[in-house]
Image: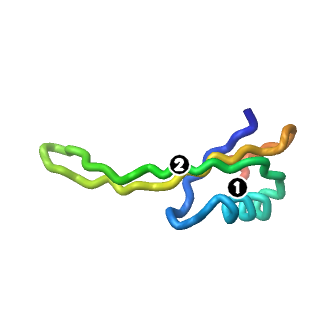
Amino acid sequence: MNKVIFKVNRLINKRSVKKSIEKIFKVNVVKVNIINKQSRLKTVRGKKVRVQGYKKAIVTLKKGQNIDLTTGI
């Protein structure tokens, strides 16, 4: 499906994600979807612990392009 998922800073927006991905990996980004995962309470050994939230960016790349995350930047 030509999609890559990144965990990004909670203050970042779609436009800056697109610019950053295109600059770092030298690919063409077609679309960016953002998912904001809220923080929640979790019970660990009988105690309530807060699990911090985060933001995920689902980046759709142009057909035929890909990002190889195993090679590093």
User: What is the quadrant of the N terminus in the image?
Assistant: top right
Is 29 situated left or right of 46 in this image? Answer: right
In this view, which residue lies farthest toward the top?
Answer: 1
In this view, which residue lies farthest toward the left?
Answer: 46
Q: In which quarter of the image is residue 46?
A: top left
In this view, which residue lies farthest toward the right?
Answer: 64
Is 56 situated left or right of 21 in this image? Answer: left
Is 52 situated left or right of 21 in this image? Answer: left
Q: How far apart are marks 1 and 2 (CA)?
A: 24 Å
> In the rendered view, would you say 48 is above or below 64?
below
Near-viewer residue (44 or 3): 3
Is 1 situated left or right of 39 in this image? Answer: right
Residue at image location 61% in from the left, 62% down from the top? 13
Foreground mark, 1 or 2? 2
> In the rendered view, would you say 52 is above or below 59?
below
Check contact, mark 1 vs mark 2: CB within 8 A.
Answer: no
Residue 17, image x and y in percent?
67, 60
Residue 16, image x and y in percent?
68, 65
Q: Mark 1 points at which residue?
A: 72
Near-viewer residue (23 or 14): 14
Residue type at numbered disc 1? Gly
Q: Name the residue under label 2.
A: 35
Residue type at numbered disc 2? Ile
Residue at image location 39% in from the left, 52% down from the top? 38
Residue 70, image x and y in percent?
69, 47
Which is more N-terminal, label 2 or label 1?
A: 2
Residue at image location 72% in from the left, 58% down from the top? 18
> In the rendered view, would you say 66 is above or below 15?
above
Q: In which quarter of the image is residue 72?
A: bottom right
